Amino acid sequence: MSYDMMNNNKVFLQGKVADEPIFNHTVMDEHFYTFNLEIPRLSGQMDLIPVTISSKLIDSHGIKVGEMIALRGQFRSFNKLEDGRSRLILSAFCREICELDSDINSNCIELSGYICKSPIYRTTPFSREICDLLIAVNRNYDKSDYIPCIAWGRNAQFVNKLPVGTKLEIVGRIQSRTYNKRVDEEHEPITKTAYEVSITKLALAEDKTAL
């Protein structure tokens, strides 16, 4: 992977292994597994972030339920066909296991990518301004990751006015949230989990001046 492509998408996560790694897929004879990493917010609420990891890293470091680990990697996406519809699947791809460090932000992501859908601006019932973005982040081999992001306050006001194709530099954290989805009137709502990047800082890529 080229240096520039690695810098487009950088993740550091530190938290507790919430469950056993489960086999996910194989690429070039290398097996990959997924598990959830539990990371507390300052508010005390927990984010449960899916992590993809190779069998080599599991064998060399060991991944045990309840253990605290730190990792570096990228936030990646792929489309999965479910019930005839394409669903965006997101996961933190682990490139290395590193030492725990209580002085470092336990949930940090840096992205450099392009707005690929028109931003959606809204306000909460408590009049908090929010803007939803979908950012395309280039990866090697002519691939891209499509990362849902959410901006708040004056950042929301700013990105709402930007056209599709604008390149942004983003710093934030990966967050999880649950919601209920009703399939039809005959069945109870299904609880689902969504993942997105909550933006703390952003800048236009041309000047990289934080807003």
Image (cartoon, rainbow, N blue to C red):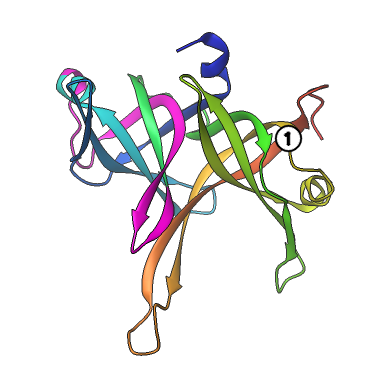
Where residue 184 appears, as percent x and y from the top left, is 39, 83
Return the residue nearer the eye: 142 or 40.
142
Left of 102 or right of it: where is 204? right
At horizontal 58% and vertical 31% (from top left) the residue drawn is 137
Return the residue nearer the eye: 204 or 127.
204
Q: Quadrant of the C terminus?
A: top right
Where residue 11 appears, as percent x and y from the top left, is 49, 28
At horizontal 55% and vertical 32% (from top left) the residue drawn is 109
Q: Which secondary structure is most common in the magenta stretch? A: strand
Q: Amino acid at mark 1?
A: Leu
Q: Is residue 65 magenta?
A: yes
Residue picked out by circle 1:
202
Judged from this view, the residue extending furthest toward the front is 84
Q: Secondary structure at mark 1?
A: strand
Indicate whether 125 appears above or below 82.
below
In magenta, the rendered stretch is 60-88
User: How many marks on residues?
Assistant: 1
